Image (cartoon, grey):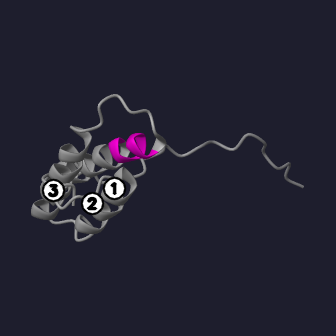
Amino acid sequence: MWREGCRDPAVVAAHATLTAAGGRPGDLDAAIAECREALACRLGNTDRAWNHLAVVKARLEGRLARALVPPAARHEARLPARPARTPRFLRAAG
């Protein structure tokens, strides 16, 4: 996107998000490379669109890191076993 002449970081962020929508590692790599290429031309600009592009790049890097972890190694949340509680108040018989 940046090589084709588009110089708007908001458009690059949107295109990178669409490129990575499939979630495959190759798509995520391409989207991250696109963000890096655009961010290399930032030159200290403080426009909000540049900050958003940096956030999109970080989010895509996180998705890529999670995509590379095999499913068997992912954590499965389970509730811990709780011991049986003794009743606080006992009913009076009678």
- 1 or 3: tag closer to the N-terminus: 3
Seen in the image, is 34 located left or right of residue 21?
left
Residue 33 rendering spot, x and y as whole percentages = 15, 50
Which amino acid does the dot numbered 2 rest on?
Ala
Which amino acid does the dot numbered 3 rest on?
Arg
Rounded to the nearest whole Å, what is the CA distance between mark 1 and mark 2?
Answer: 5 Å
Q: Which residue is mark 2?
A: 16
Q: Main secondary structure of the magenta part?
A: helix
Seen in the image, is 30 located left or right of residue 18?
left
Secondary structure at numbered mark 2: helix
Please say if the residues under marks 1 and 3 sit with CB atoms less than 8 Å apart.
Answer: no
**Looking at the image, how many numbered discs can be counted on the residues?**
3
The numbered disc on residue 13 is 1
Secondary structure at numbered mark 3: loop
Q: Which residue is mark 3?
A: 3
- In the figure, residue 87 lies in which quadrant? top right
Rounded to the nearest whole Å, what is the CA distance between mark 1 and mark 3?
Answer: 14 Å
Residue at image position (37%, 44%) is 55
Residue at image position (35%, 47%) is 53
| Front-most of residues 48 and 41 | 41
Secondary structure at numbered mark 1: helix
